[in-house]
Image (cartoon, rainbow, N blue to C red):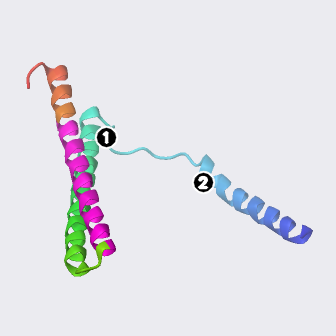
């Protein structure tokens, strides 16, 4: 047991010493500085991507639940599970589109407050 702990300690120590030059290396900064407009563009792009993916996942759940509902036939428990999946997909879609609306409203308000014109 002591031998394994000692080997682990030596391994961690050697790995740490191997990283020392990279920690103290001076990075070279090139390019243009980050501005508020460029940061806003990145955040907006990420938000639109996540909303798009969330909408696709919600539609997939709704369609998958519909297929399961049709395949359930006379099985009441399978039909109930399928209805629950469809309902959860609809709730998810409503949340996704509600968040999209809130983000669009917040962006409009921020633009109005910062420039004074809509």
Disc 1 element: loop
Please say if 6 is above or below 45.
Answer: below
Residue 111's x, y, as percent?
Answer: 16, 27
The CA distance from mark 2 to mark 1 is: 24 Å
Q: Name the residue under label 1.
A: 32
Q: In which quarter of the image is the N terminus?
A: bottom right
Q: Which numbered disc, 2 or 1, marks the residue that appears first in the sequence?
A: 2
Identified at 28% across, 49% down, the residue is 46
In the rendered structure, are the residues bearing label 2 and label 1 in contact, judged by CB atoms less than 8 Å apart?
Answer: no
Q: In which quarter of the image is the C terminus?
A: top left
Residue located farthest toward the left when viewing the structure as drawn: 118
Please say if 25 is above or below 116.
Answer: below
Residue 62 location, quadrant: bottom left
For this view, does 16 lie left or right of residue 68? Answer: right
Identified at 21% across, 43% down, the residue is 98
Q: Mark 2 points at which residue?
A: 22
Q: Give the range drawn in magenta.
A: 77-104
Few, some or many residues within 10 Å of mark 2 (<14, 14–19, 20+): few
Few, some or many residues within 10 Å of mark 1 (<14, 14–19, 20+): few
């Amino acid at each position: 047991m002591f031998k394994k702990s000692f080997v682990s300690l030596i391994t961690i120590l050697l790995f740490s010493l191997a990283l020392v030059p990279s920690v103290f290396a001076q990075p070279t900064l090139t390019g243009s500085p980050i501005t508020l407009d460029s940061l806003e563009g990145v955040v907006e792009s990420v938000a639109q991507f996540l909303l798009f993916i969330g909408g696709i996942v919600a539609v997939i759940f709704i369609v998958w639940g519909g297929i399961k509902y049709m395949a359930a036939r006379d099985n009441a428990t399978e039909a109930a599970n399928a209805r629950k999946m469809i309902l959860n997909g609809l709730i998810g879609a409503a949340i996704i589109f509600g968040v999209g609306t809130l983000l669009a409203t917040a962006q409009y308000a921020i633009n109005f407050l910062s420039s004074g014109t809509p």
